[in-house]
């Protein structure tokens, strides 16, 4: 189990996000460096056979970097604190994190209900990869009624994104948690757009695990790939045979730590989807300024969404911060501090619009310091069947824009000249 943080736990419980973001994961004492240390090594020593055996049973310290590394461990403590969870496992990418989270709840014969407005890679996992292992998924409209109707006795996991990519619709997290828990299933939430607990902490609304593409706002500078799975403090595994079968069962052997233990065992130890220490170091640095960046980006995004929705050359604008959005009420219920840094909008001629941009760049990433646009129909969602693309809120006219930290006036002028 990851130490929640190395701040005194009674103090940490009362500290604000910004304070936890810069102080968690750092030791205190004479000669201790101020910051997270980058430890680039593959193996760690034991001074006795007992110590080695103990470490391989508990993963409490470090043994071999495919299982755990001190730099990654410090990052995991930081993410756990920011998401309000009990433990975190970091992985090589957001895609690896989603895969690990899904595999931690399901085995052959099991079923997942997911909302259809998901990142294309997640649709790919559910539609292409997991079926190879005998795990099936049903993708439905992002409403509690549609999710409830799709539940089956074998459903072990409900999967949603806090804010859908790129439709910018907000999931009704508490309702989804109730539906999942009513039959002993788990709720997994991809909280990438929620900014590592800054805008939303799904675990406080009943989710059992949250994943991140740390590539986005956590790293924040478009420099590295990374992912994480954070588990909550209370989750009921008593009706999932993965955890209850066997002698001893995973649940009886690992108790409350069983879910995170299986995630580390599968994601890093068995599948080797390891986050390199250098990437962990850069992501931990990025987290220190996440709140400054994302708060500013949310303000700029709202202003740009208002500008675009009043522009004659723009069709539908999807952004939950707009009072006219059908997701505004859910946004107010689940998001705090802003409605996210990403929106999608429609233009009549995407190719011409994109070619005319002079400051904003076309690239398939989110959460960068720079504003980036992409045409989801041909790129991020391009491999999906047309019906699935439309169900995800993507049309041939859609542009997705992730707003960076540039001056609002410069971004607005660039959009205006490209549209006019
Ligand atoms: C919401 C969401 N989840 C997961 C991923 C996958 O993350 P990664 O590219 O780090 O594998 C992405 C990537 O764009 C994403 O937008």
Image: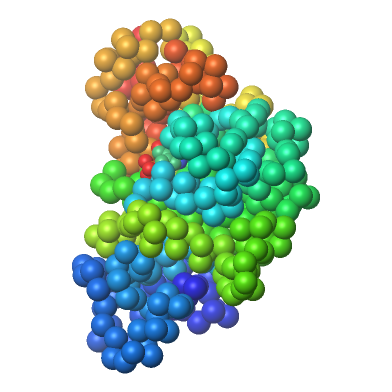
Left/right of residue 89 with respect to residue 247 in the rendered view: left
Residue at x-position 58% and y-position 49%:
106
User: Which residue is found at the position 45% from the left and 63% from the top?
Assistant: 265
Q: Quadrant of residue 323?
A: top right
Q: Quadrant of ligand 1?
A: top left
Q: Position of residue 364 (x, y in %)?
A: 33, 31
Residue at the limit of the structure toward the right, as seen here: 182
Q: Is residue 231 left or right of residue 288?
A: right
* Res 288 visible: no
Q: Residue at x 46, y 77 (%)?
A: 58
Residue 325: tell me if it is visible.
Answer: yes
165 shown above or below 286: above
Q: Residue furthest left?
A: 40
Is residue 174 positioned above or below 132 on the image?
below
In this orientation, which residue lies closer to the viewer: 311 or 267? 267
**Residue visible at 32% across and 12% down?**
351
Q: How many marks?
A: 0
Instruction: Determine whether, in the image, residue 390 is placed left or right of residue 286.
Output: right
| Visual colour scheme | rainbow
Q: Camera-side residue: 58 or 286?
A: 58
> Percent x, y for residue 215?
35, 46
Task: Residue 395 in the image: state x and y as whole percent.
Answer: 49, 15
From this view, report whether residue 281 is shown above or below residue 227. Answer: below
Q: Based on the displayed image, in which of its 4 quarters is residue 319 positioned?
A: top right
Residue 9: give x, y in percent of width and height: 54, 79
The quarter in which the C terminus is drawn is top left
């Amino acid at each position: 189990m990851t130490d929640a943080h190395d701040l005194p736990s009674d103090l940490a419980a009362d500290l604000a996000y910004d304070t936890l973001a810069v102080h968690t994961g750092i030791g205190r004492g004479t000669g201790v460096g101020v910051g997270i240390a980058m430890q680039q090594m593959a193996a760690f020593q034991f001074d006795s056979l007992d110590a080695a055996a103990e470490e391989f049973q508990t993963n409490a310290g470090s043994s071999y970097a495919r299982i755990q590394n001190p730099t990654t461990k410090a990052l995991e403590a930081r993410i756990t604190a920011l998401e309000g969870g009990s433990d975190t496992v970091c992985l090589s990418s957001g895609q690896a994190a989603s895969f690990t989270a899904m595999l931690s709840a399901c085995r052959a014969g099991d079923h997942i209900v997911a909302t259809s407005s998901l990142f294309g890679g997640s649709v790919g996992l559910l539609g292409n990869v997991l079926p190879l292992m005998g795990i099936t998924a049903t993708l439905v409209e992002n409403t509690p009624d549609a999710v409830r109707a799709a539940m089956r006795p074998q459903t072990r996991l409900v999967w949603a994104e806090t804010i859908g990519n790129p439709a910018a619709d907000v999931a009704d997290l508490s309702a989804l948690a109730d539906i999942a828990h009513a039959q002993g299933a788990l709720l997994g939430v991809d909280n990438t757009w929620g900014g590592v607990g800054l805008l939303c902490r799904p675990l406080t609304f009943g989710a059992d695990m949250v994943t991140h593409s740390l590539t986005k706002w956590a790293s924040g500078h478009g420099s590295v790939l990374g992912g994480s799975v954070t588990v909550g403090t209370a989750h009921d595994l008593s009706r999932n045979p993965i955890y209850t079968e066997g002698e001893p069962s995973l649940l009886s052997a690992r108790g409350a730590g069983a879910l995170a233990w299986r995630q580390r065992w599968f994601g890093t130890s068995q599948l080797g989807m390891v986050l390199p220490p250098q990437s962990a170091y850069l992501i931990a640095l990025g987290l220190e300024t996440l709140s400054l960046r994302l708060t500013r980006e949310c303000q700029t995004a709202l202003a740009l969404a208002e500008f675009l929705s009043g522009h004659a050359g723009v069709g539908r604008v999807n952004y939950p911060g707009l009072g006219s959005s059908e997701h505004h009420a859910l946004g107010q219920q689940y998001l705090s501090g802003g409605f996210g840094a990403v929106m999608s909008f429609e233009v009549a001629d995407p190719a011409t619009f994109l070619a005319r941009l002079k400051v904003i760049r076309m690239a398939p990433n989110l959460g960068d310091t720079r504003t980036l646009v992409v045409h989801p129909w041909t790129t991020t969602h391009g491999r999906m069947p047309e019906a699935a693309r439309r169900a995800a809120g993507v049309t041939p006219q859609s542009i997705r824009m992730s707003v960076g930290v540039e001056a609002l006036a410069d971004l607005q002028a660039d959009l205006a000249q490209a549209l006019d």
